Structure formats: C-alpha cells, structure tokens
Image (cartoon, rainbow, N blue to C red):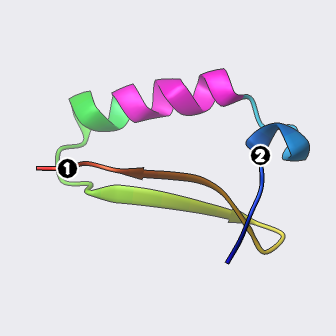
Amino acid sequence: MKRDDPKYFEINTDELNKLDNIIKEDYSNINGIVMIKNGYKIYEFFLLF
C-alpha cells in the first residue's frame, strides 16, 4: 500500500485529529479506521487496549 501525506490530497489534518478524539470518546465500538484515496493510505487510527 502506498502512503502519502493527507495535505497532498487537500485533507485538513486538524480535522483528522478531531476525528481521533471523537472516535475515542463517542464510538467505543470502533477499533480502527483506515482511509484510502486514489490508492494511497492517507490516514489510519487504531485504539490500543
């Protein structure tokens, strides 16, 4: 899997950081998220227990 900076795809990294907090606080049933755009992994978040 290719990987690139979210800013390259005009994705606001501040919003991704907010998403991290929302997942932790409001969605305890989600263990992780991976975002792929145009074949590039631009974001991943996993909760470690």
- 1 displayed left or right of 22: right
Give the dominant element type of the magenta stretch: helix, strand or loop. Answer: helix
C-alpha separation, residue under disc 1 versus residue under disc 2:
23 Å
Counting from the top left corner in percent of width and height, residue 28 is at: 17, 44
Counting from the top left corner in percent of width and height, residue 11 is at: 78, 37
Counting from the top left corner in percent of width and height, residue 26 is at: 25, 33
- 20 displayed left or right of 49: right
Residue at (76% x, 43% y) in the render:
6
Q: Nearer the viewer, residue 45 or 30?
A: 45
Tag 1: amino acid: Leu
Tag 2: amino acid: Asp
Q: In the image, is residue 17 part of the stretch drawn in magenta?
A: yes
Residue 37 location, quadrant: bottom right
**Residue to which mark 2 is pinned:** 5
Q: Nearer the viewer, residue 37 or 4?
A: 4
How packed mark 2 is, by other alpha carbons closer than 10 Å (few <14, some 14-19, many 20 or more), is few
Q: In the image, is residue 6 part of the stretch drawn in magenta?
A: no
Residue at (52% x, 27% y) in the render:
17
- 4 displayed left or right of 20: right
How packed mark 1 is, by other alpha carbons closer than 10 Å (few <14, some 14-19, many 20 or more), is few
In the displayed structure, would residue 4 be above or below residue 20? below
**Residue to which mark 1 is pinned:** 48
- SS at mark 1? loop
Counting from the top left corner in percent of width and height, residue 1 is at: 67, 78
Q: Which mark is residue 12?
A: none
User: Which residue occupies the extreme left position in the image?
Assistant: 49
In the displayed structure, would residue 24 be above or below residue 48? above
Residue at (26% x, 54% y) in the render:
30
Residue at (52% x, 61% y) in the render:
34
Residue 25 location, quadrant: top left
**Residues shaded magenta:** 13-21
Residue 20 location, quadrant: top left
